[in-house]
Amino acid sequence: MKTYNNSKIKRGTTFVKDLSHKADQYLNAQEPFDTKDTILKIIPLGGSEEIGGRNMTVIEYGKDIIVIDIGMKFPEEDQPGIDYIIPNPSYLKGKEDRIRAVLITHGHMDHIGGVSQVMSMIGNPPIYAPALPLAMMQRRQGEFTTLPALNGHIAKLNEKIRLGVFTVTFLHINHSIPDSTMIKIETPEGVILHTGDFKIDATPVGEAPADLEMYKKIGDEGVLLLMSDSTSASKPGRLVSEMTIQNNIDHIFENATGKIIVTTFSSALNRIQQMINLSEKYNRKVLIEGFSMKTNIQILHEIGYARFSPQTIISAQEARNLPPENLTIICTGAQGDERSALTRIANKEHRNFQIEPGDTVIFSSSVIPGNEESVQKIKDALAKQRANIIHYQMMEVHVSGHAHKEDLKQVLEIIRPKYLQPIYGDFYSLKSHSDLAQEVGMPRENILLTDNGRVIQVYKGEARVTTQKVNASNMMVDGLGIGDLKEMVIRDRQSLAQDGILTIVVLLDLKQSKIIRDPEIVSKGFVHIQTSTKLLDSIKERVKEHIEKKLEKEGQYQSIEDIQQSIREDLGLFLFKTTHRRPMIIPVIIEI
């Protein structure tokens, strides 16, 4: 299988130099242990130096391997045409019979979105997960009819599972989706505690708080390594409790006079359940808009996790017949998605609903960097229609699912690990986690900062980040293709997106060494033909003169391909000098 390493592509959105070639220095990497004894290895194949990434970690000891999470991430602006990106499991090729299991911490797509494709590449080993993420993965697996069914097992909280030399235990923790877990991994070198995504909340809504006394007991027994969520490590203070959020939203519901439209992430199931419960409290029916959101609600019902009456959820036709004060719409579109329900409502393109003066729109989510402009345009459109707009920057109607600085300090003080490996975050976040760990007394040399593919070794109780790396390049999914995109394909797409395409058609009589008629030009995304006649005439003349000049030199060309390449080179230089653009140039030579 061909893979594509994204680090080779020029980033169109930044002028910052790529320093990954100096990673050994800024990670303080050491040479691997010089021993033939069995060594514990921890290898992040995704999730280091990236947020919302293709999280996947390999833990290996001798002939036993376990894998934690197999996520996906969405493409960046300079990756046109890519559907999503998954981890590259090539390190596990030839080791399939040694993989004892895949363990899933929770049901967000950056932790389960790559399962369907990757599992078939690594031998489809057993997969252990709590009930909700397992049901979500099985539902998604059904969309890939050519792939085998998952060998899924429900992981029950606090029950030990023996996997070769490893013993794992799933532990309850709070996040923004039900069934979120930390995983305790007992290894021959000591205990590893993998947090997954988590936050500390003493008063969560709809679920129990994490048992901090239990975690303290684990710490008392000794933890070799804490692999801890770093997503919000740079954010000061503590997170607001979900109970505070619910009380604020309750106040909004109590005073709303028209429709209430709530937009949030489709996977924010705790928040969605809150909104449905409040709708029931204030005699409102609920319409769910968005395919993925509807699917997740169906899964909640199927596994018995729904904390609301099925009669509360109604169809669009039923919703049209309700008075506005009795209707809540929960929909996608919190990030300004072009075809989301909220965007269509804001643009008056929704076939069932429009904004009426007095309607309330709640943005119950933070804005992902890069989406600010799209979200602002939606807010502007809603404001022009006299909607009441409420978002997290003006009122606490959303809280992150990731622990802030003081929460992370608290976890370190409870667990007291010998080593810390910050995970899940860009390098700034990983470094911030390292800094706060040192504030609570952890030695700098006991903090393991890594990049993707970096091998951490543990031998006789000592852990080190090594200079050894494995392939952790991006594996891109484009339609039915997985990992088969070459670097040149992405560059071609970037060129098309940035500078367009210029096609030159030339009729040529090679026997008589002459052009039959003037070249024809087709421009797409480069210049407008009707308003750029002077430039296009210059291009035609230059191509014609170039070919005629070269044809005079007998033996200059060996094939049509030689002529095409010569045109590309000459015209490319000319266009850059005259326009400072580099369109993709496609010469079409028709031999008569």
Image: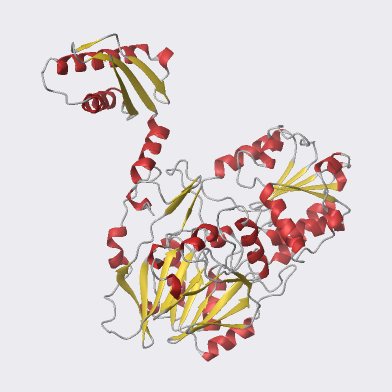
Colour convention of the picture: secondary structure
Question: Where residue 516 appears, x then y in whole percent?
Answer: 27, 9
In the displayed structure, does residue 229 sit left or right of residue 355?
Answer: left
Residue lying at the far bottom of the rendered structure: 221
Residue name at image x 49 percent, y 82 percent: 164
Question: Where residue 263 appears, x then y in whole percent?
Answer: 69, 49
Q: Is residue 481 above or below residue 226?
A: above
In the displayed structure, does residue 229 sit left or right of residue 172?
Answer: left
Residue 24 falls in image quadrant: bottom left
Q: Is residue 99 above or below residue 566?
A: below
Q: Is residue 462 above or below residue 282?
A: below
In the displayed structure, does residue 276 sit left or right of residue 265?
Answer: right
Residue name at image x 39 percent, y 38 percent: 494
Quadrant for the N terminus in the image: bottom left
Q: Is residue 75 visible?
A: yes
Residue lying at the far top of the rendered structure: 517
Q: How many marks?
A: 0
Q: Is residue 246 above or below residue 79?
A: below
Question: Where residue 379 appears, x then y in whole percent?
Answer: 65, 40
Quadrant for the C terminus in the image: top left
Residue 31 falls in image quadrant: bottom left
Residue name at image x 20 percent, y 17 percent: 546
Residue name at image x 74 percent, y 67 percent: 205
Question: Where residue 545 appears, x then y in whole percent?
Answer: 20, 14
Q: Is residue 451 visible?
A: no
Task: Give the camera-side residue of 324 and 339.
Answer: 339
